[in-house]
């Protein structure tokens, strides 16, 4: 049985997250020898959104694809880049007609991998379309069994439900958005690797990557205040997924955390 590895890094938050990826990705590549590297970059520009310059940096570091989320368009200039043909995806179930796409296919070493980005709807933007239907529509005519889904969602129940919805039809369903790594990584009976949230690549000693003093004041006073990325060293959170080359079904999923 021949296998390969997908390395996925969770939401990169601001400069501390980018610095951590730049520092630690080489050692992760050496350890796991991944065929595909995928990075969620939706918080990489000042904590909200992504720019074309940052996306190009991720590609130069070895990323094969970039996924996004609900902050896709916080930097308006990214709209043109999303239509440039680069391997970057935003949630497919956003409004029809906006820039970008929700699925790409990338090929390396004889493996065709479909990378899909979807957003949850519970406690998220009510304008999003049904992500379960979107997955069905995107995959019904796919010619490859190798399918990776970044499900960018808030609540655990919706993420878990998506895992079971895709069981046996996706290689992996990984949750992003909440920035806290969960300890429920598993390979479902149908051969789909699953984790509720991969966690973030961002500043430690923070509140989900944001300056903790600012967040504490907001909670204690209720007064509005601009969020700022914490000025702290970055941590790495991700997963390494081992996949059968013949069937596209996962054989293992390993959580990754680098906190030093």
Image (cartoon, rainbow, N blue to C red):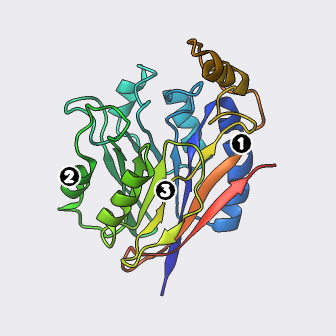
**Front label number (1 vs 3):** 3
Q: Is residue 202 above or below residue 161?
A: above
Q: Is residue 251 above or below residue 224?
A: below
**Front label number (2 vs 3):** 3
Left of 250 or right of it: where is 230?
right
Image location of residue 21, percent across then percent down = 67, 44
Left of 186 or right of it: where is 113?
left
In percent of the image, x 37 and y 62: which residue is there? 163
**In front here: 111 or 14?**
14
**Residue 29: which quarter of the image?**
bottom right
Q: Secondary structure at mark 3?
A: loop
In percent of the image, x 62 and y 62: which residue is there? 255
Farthest residue toward the right?
Answer: 260
Image location of residue 34, percent across then percent down = 57, 64
Cα distance, mark 2 to mark 1? 36 Å
* Residue under numbered circle 1: 20
* Residue under numbered circle 2: 133
Q: Is residue 162 above or below residue 131?
A: below
Mark 3, residues whose alpha carbon is within 10 Å: few (<14), some, or many (≥20)?
A: many
For residue 196, the mark is 3
Left of 157 or right of it: where is 203?
right
């Amino acid at each position: 049985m021949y296998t390969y590895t997908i390395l996925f890094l969770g939401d990169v938050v601001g400069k501390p997250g980018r610095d951590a990826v730049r520092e630690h990705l080489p050692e992760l590549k050496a350890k796991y020898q991944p065929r595909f590297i995928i990075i969620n970059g939706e918080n990489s520009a000042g904590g909200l959104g992504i720019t074309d310059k940052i996306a190009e940096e991720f590609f130069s570091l070895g990323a094969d694809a970039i996924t996004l989320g609900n902050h896709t368009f916080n930097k308006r200039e990214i709209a043109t880049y999303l239509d440039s043909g680069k391997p970057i995806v935003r949630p497919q179930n956003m409004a029809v007609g906006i820039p970008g796409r929700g699925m790409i296919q990338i090929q390396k070493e004889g493996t065709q991998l479909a990378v899909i980005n979807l957003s949850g709807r519970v406690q998220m933007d009510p304008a999003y379309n049904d992500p379960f239907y979107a997955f069905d529509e995107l995959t019904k005519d796919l010619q490859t069994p190798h399918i990776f889904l970044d499900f960018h969602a808030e609540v655990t129940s919706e993420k878990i439900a998506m895992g079971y919805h895709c069981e046996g039809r996706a290689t992996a369903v990984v949750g992003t958005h909440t920035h806290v790594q969960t300890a429920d990584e598993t390979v479902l009976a149908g051969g789909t690797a699953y984790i509720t949230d991969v966690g973030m690549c961002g500043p430690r000693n923070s509140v989900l990557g944001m300056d903790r003093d600012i967040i504490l004041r907001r909670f204690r006073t209720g007064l509005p205040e601009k969020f700022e990325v914490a000025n702290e060293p970055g941590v790495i959170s991700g997963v390494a997924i081992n996949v059968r080359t013949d069937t596209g079904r996962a054989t293992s999923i390993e959580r990754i955390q680098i906190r030093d």
